[in-house]
Image: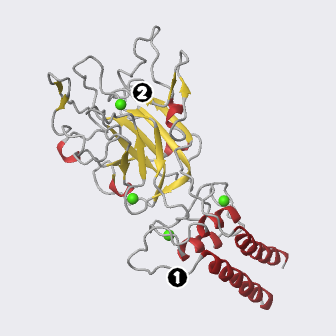
Amino acid sequence: MFAKSWKMIGWMGAAATCVSALCTPAHAARYADVPGYYEPGSNLDVVFGSVPVEPFDNAQAALGGPGQQVALSQGTLTEIVSLGGWTDDPNTGTNNRTTGLVVGFSVEVVNNPGDDLLIVGNAPSAFQFYEPGFIEVAIESDGGGAKPGGWQDETFHLIKPGNFDLISDPRNANNPITITSNPDFSLNYSAPFDDDTNLPGYFDVTPGGDGFNLSDAININGDPVNLFSIAYVRMRSVSDSAFPFGSFIAPDVDYIEVLEIVGETNGDGFVGLSDLGNVLGNWNSAVPSGSVIQGDLSGDGFVGIDDLNLVLGNWNAGTPPPTSVPEPVTATTLCLTLAGIATTRRRSVMTQ
Ligand SMILES: [Ca+2]
Ligand SMILES: [Ca+2]
Ligand SMILES: [Ca+2]
Ligand SMILES: [Ca+2]
């Protein structure tokens, strides 16, 4: 009886808080925030002219959002980390594919309609100069978001690059790219990497970043993998080839942004009753930290007011799925409805 009463008070408190705050929308951008693993490949980029050599090898640069700088070995500040060229696991000589950069998200990234991640490198807008890298993604099988070291026992799935059928599977083989320069110093890349406006599924290609859709994930056999969400991303270079002026292809990562609809919990691209149900269904409960399907949008491992406000504050955001209709309610009327739900629930509890 005590437990039921406590739960009832919690529900009524939820409605009251929602009304008082009028469900302030929360639209803060979200970025990779859990360090994973970094083993650079060959020919890492270094600070030009640095003596001793100062490589761009601080993996912390890939965490957080734009403008955040980290210090390199000689104190140079930078926003990027270089991954080096494609390498066949230089430390162990096995094919365990540990080379690359792994980062995680403390709140899982849900596969919504369209692109789900934006990876920003440092491809310039003034001229064609790109260093394509591919990505693999993994869930946290314990549920929810990324945990320190949690990536190690997960299976990573390739986000299928647009030219996948024309190349060697980058998980298993280097893809040489011949790069030549013209008299005006512009560059030519050999096919099928010759057009930087048509290389979906690679990062450090497009100025401003490249989008990735979790629906493009394939397993090691090339078959599609149905992912509701992911917690980890691993990035590597597709090639170890050289530029005509001496340096080598070595993709860079500045930051990784989650292209999410805040308040979304079930992957239908719309914030509505289903999402409210996912929060209220676990109300006042502990769940795996960052499990959005269980309602922990705030990532604190508990479903409560913070999570409710993220749903109500973004009510009706996104595009309604074809099989449903928009919820014809405002945040204020929804809060009143919620109060009604709590009252109804109180009656049902009392009559039990
Ligand atoms: Ca998607
Ligand atoms: Ca670059
Ligand atoms: Ca939804
Ligand atoms: Ca929470």
* 163 sits left or right of 213 in the view: left
Position in image of residue 149 (x %, y %) = 56, 40
Q: Amino acid at mark 1?
A: Pro
Task: Determine whether 65 is above or below 144 in the image.
Answer: above
Which of the two marks, 1 or 2, is nearer to us in this view?
A: 1
Residue 110 can be seen, yes or no: yes
Tell me what residue is drawn at x 26 percent, y 41 percent: 169
Task: Give the colouring mode of the picture.
Answer: secondary structure
Q: Amino acid at mark 2?
A: Pro
Report the Cα–Cα distance between label 1 and label 2.
Answer: 52 Å
| Callout count | 2
Which residue in the structure is indicated by mark 1? Answer: 328
Tell me what residue is drawn at x 43 percent, y 59 percent: 111
Position in image of residue 183 (x %, y %) = 14, 21
In the depicted view, which residue is nearer to us: 304 or 263?
263
In the rendered image, the quadrant that contains the C terminus is: bottom right
Neighbor class of circle 1 (other Cα within 10 Å; few <14, some 14-19, many 20+) is: few
* 33 sits left or right of 19 in the view: left
Which residue in the structure is indicated by mark 2? Answer: 40
Report ligand 1 position as a quadrant: bottom left
Task: Determine whether 68 is above or below 338 in the image.
Answer: above
Tell me what residue is drawn at x 43 percent, y 74 percent: 320
Q: Secondary structure at mark 1?
A: loop
Position in image of residue 325 (x %, y %) = 45, 81
